[in-house]
Image: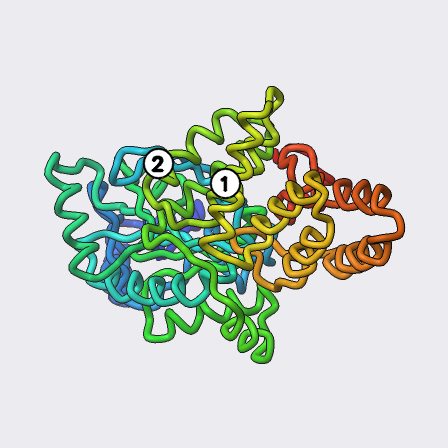
Amino acid sequence: MTGACKPLWGKRLSQEQRKMSFNGFFHKGFFVLLLSALVAFTAQAGKCETPAPAKAPEEVKAQAPAPATAAAPAQVPAHEVTLPPFTLKGLDGSEFKMEALKSYPLSIVVFFATWNPKSVPALTELQKLSDKYEKNNVAVLAVNAENERTDPGFKPALEKFLADNKITLSVVIDEGLAVYRSWEIKALPTTYVFNKDLKVLSSLAGAPTSYGDTIEETIKTDLGLTPKEEGAASAEHKRYRPADKAITLQYGMVEKKAERGRVSQALGELDEIIKKDDKFADAHALRGVLLLSEKKSGEAEKKAAKEAFDKAAGLDPTLPLALIGQANFLAEAGDLKKAVELLTVAFSQSNWGTRDKPENQKELLASVESIAAKLGKDDAGAKKELLELVDGFMTIHEGPKVNRKKMEDAAGAPAK
């Protein structure tokens, strides 16, 4: 029991008992009873736990259950619990908002500290899971909960800690332990798994030997990965991902801003991402879309957009968004046959990079086949249908098909 101990007795003495004489009070039988009660009280008091010190999170010593407010699966049904949102800074000083995790079908948030020995195996397991399920767009964020006050030289020490343990996960710092306390965390490490709506799927305190298997089981269950599907996912073409996980998370935030119509701001941040990693094909393809989505998009923007799609396709020849962008320009130039070929390849892909695969993929392929059948017979009609087909993919804040699954379900409405 944590906190104040409950008294071993709670009833008031009766009036008759209060009138007991001094001599009667020391009656042998009553004295023995009183002595027994005192012994019992002393034993019970020894069982009371001392509250954790305020200056640093308590290290978990066993597979302690997560607090009730942390949505322990056995106590609270999945998809019903949310936790207070946060905005924290990374090692480079840039802000990260918890809302950015909505860009992912599933995300994992782990609280850790360099002084906590069990944090190392937890981070190591999550690094493996992050690498394994990166193709499934699973995000992992590590929140450092070092202490209420951190030394100015702490960040270099934290960077060394991460490097020594070969951890490349995105890391933010909970300065002052504000999030640690608002989430009512009791031990380190503590791990949460969220769905795309940031509802808690599961939580786990500590790092038991089954830690990695427990988290992975939640991933497989929520993503619906049966052994057969998982094998297929592993065998399919792997898209390039930046080694720096912070870039991937920043990219998700850019998508969110674009979906809300803040295209100019999103473009500026996307250019920063490309400067950091020019091999990130998804970023180049998205840049092409944003350039065409600009309200004042003119010939210069169209030229830059075409170059962006060509660059993305050069880096990843089967990236759907890059091929769709190229098909758009080919159709406008009159090369309908090549445009149809690219769309056929694009809509046949099972891996859409950082984007969710469209649920109407079969219908999209059927539309391309219908357009192909008109070539040489009704080129004008074929061109019109093809441009209408790809138009939704070229206007990210208006067309539902280019947005993430949540945006597709919301028919293109801005995320809340």
* Residue 233 falls left or right of residue 121: right
Mark 2 Cα shell of 10 Å, populated few (<14), some (14-19), many (≥20)? some
Q: Quadrant of residue 243?
A: bottom left
In this rendering, is residue 388 above or below 293? below
Note whether 408 is above or below 166 in the view shown.
above
Closest to the observer: 236 or 345?
345
Tell me the amino acid under the disc marked 2. Leu
Judging by the rendered image, the residue that carries numbered circle 1 is: 308
| Residue ranking furthest to the bottom | 228
Mark 1 Cα-neighbour bin, 10 Å: few <14, some 14–19, many ≥20 = many
Question: The residue tagged with tag 1: helix, strand or loop?
Answer: helix
Question: Which quadrant holds the N terminus?
Answer: bottom left
Viewer-nearest residue: 301 or 10? 301
Between 103 and 316, which is closer to the camera in this rendering?
316
Q: Is residue 383 left or right of residue 287?
A: right
Q: Residue furthest right?
A: 377
Is residue 173 toward the left or the right of residue 211 in the image? left
Residue nearer the viewer, 69 or 147 = 147
**Display coloring:** rainbow
* Figure quadrant of the C terminus: top right
How many numbered tags mark residues here?
A: 2
Decide if residue 37 is in sight here.
Answer: no
The answer to whether residue 15 is visible is: yes
